[in-house]
Amino acid sequence: MKKLFKITIFLLLIVAVLYVAEVFYLHFSYPQTRWDWSKIDTNDVSFPKDFYWGTATAAHQIEGNNENTNWGEWEKDSSRIKDKSNAKIAVDGWNRWREDVKLMKDLGVNSYRFSLAWNKIEPEKGKINEDALKHYDEFINDLKANNIEPMITLHHFTHPLWFEQLGAFEKEENIKHFVEFSRIVFVRYRDRVNLWVTLNEPNVFVTSGYFNTAFPPGKPNPKLAAEVLKNMLKAHVEVYKALKTPLQQRPPIEERWKIGLATSIFQFEPARRWHLGDWAIARISSNTFNEGVLGFFRDGRMKFHVPFEVDLTYEDANAPNTLDFIGVNYYSHYAFRFDFDFKKATQSLPVEGEAMTDMPYTIYTEGIYRAIKDVSALKKPIIITENGISDAKDDRREKYIKQSLYAVSKAIKDGYDVRGYFYWTLLDNFEWAEGYTQKFGLYEVNLETQERKLRNGSKAFVEIIGKSK
């Protein structure tokens, strides 16, 4: 009996030592970047003269009249939207674009990222709406006339209803439709547009549409999620090749066209850094959400693993050669606390001890430096394609902007190849499942009168741009 007791104690000691060793390994392998902002002068920033200063929007969120889409159909059930609203009018960007270009000019930005409404350009499969193409012609021309470089996003969460009814990216056979749409608009606008984003946040599209079901199609299906992500990444590669291949026969100057993809980077932390269960959930989440995209463009391998649900690996050795830049959308980080109930364990929690944004996550501005560092492993130029804060009271925006841009400036000083920063977003808009409850805009918008007004907190952005010129 004594011998059994001693063996048990010995085994428990081994387990304890291994547990502590693993915690120490994880702690030092995945440090949580923390800066003492009270000791940092956020005015000490500098940026290259050719830096892209911009704001970003998406067609569905601002234009209005976007009912013939997956999202337009989704919004018909008002219970899916926090304030039971919809984007039928949004902030009337389709009609007020001249006014909005003037607002950009007033900010001092030299670039603007926006998406094209595929549903307006191709409302029926194979039928192109010339009037919609002319609308974007005029818009792009006005941007260029005001020395604002356009950056076009080809897919920002929405697509025509006919594409959705075909199964969208759930079926590999549908990729050809997105490639053809991309080719049509590229040929139309390439004489004036040098910067192109194929897909916006495929990881968010998959997570929100096939896990938490906040987005259409609202199918909680991890296996299908993995297939959709694989097909979206494959679609990027095919679009890149379709748009770039003809350019190889042209003079080198034609290589001015830069094609990238925008991915969301959220850091996932263990709520308790001593708890292996918390670490396990955080690492699994990070590997699925962040590494699913980053690994594909770094190593040519997408790995999508959810324990007991799905384990998919997709390889394309040429994938790392299909990016001219990588777009980074950064907002914050989340914490995870282990629970034997897997649904509870995978609920993203705000990190304790940090100030909140109006969204259910905290202000963690040094995280943008951390995101840049992680993404730099792709060895591609980096553009911050989205970064911003939801702040209806406008009492945190100035500080957020200054700290975020200090972090970007520091990254550049430390040798990271960051080429631009696009603030999300130009205007308050329809913020997907949150409706109009979230106020990310540099300009606040009165939804009844559509009046735009620059927020006081946004002036820090204008000042930093002005000093950098």
Image: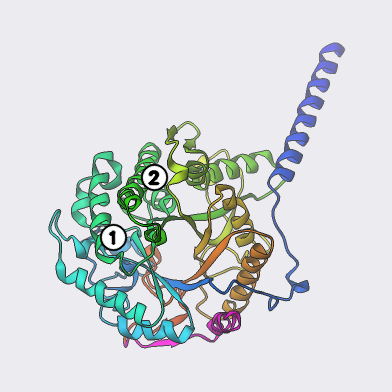
Q: In this orientation, which residue lies closer to the viewer: 439 or 228? A: 228
Q: Amino acid at mark 2?
A: Leu
Circle 2 residues within 10 Å: few <14, some 14–19, many ≥20: many
Q: Residue at x 57, y 62 (%)?
A: 418
Q: Amino acid at mark 1?
A: Phe
The residue carrying mark 1 is: 186
Q: CA distance from mark 1 to mark 2?
A: 19 Å
Question: Mark number for residue 233?
Answer: 2
Q: Taking 465 as reference, is 380 above or below it?
A: above
Q: Residue at x 36, y 42 (%)?
A: 234
In x, y percent, where is residue 282?
Answer: 59, 45
* Mark 2 element type: helix
Would residue 245 be counted in the magenta stretch? Answer: no
Q: Is residue 239 left or right of residue 400?
A: left
Q: In this orientation, which residue lies closer to the viewer: 244 or 434? A: 244
Q: Which residues are magenta?
A: 449-469
Q: Single out the mark in the foreground, 1 or 2.
A: 1
Q: In this orientation, which residue lies closer to the viewer: 222 or 7? A: 222
For the N terminus, the quadrant is top right
In x, y percent, where is residue 245?
Answer: 33, 48
In x, y percent, where is residue 343?
Answer: 49, 44
Question: Mark number for residue 76?
Answer: none
Residue with the most extreme front position:
251
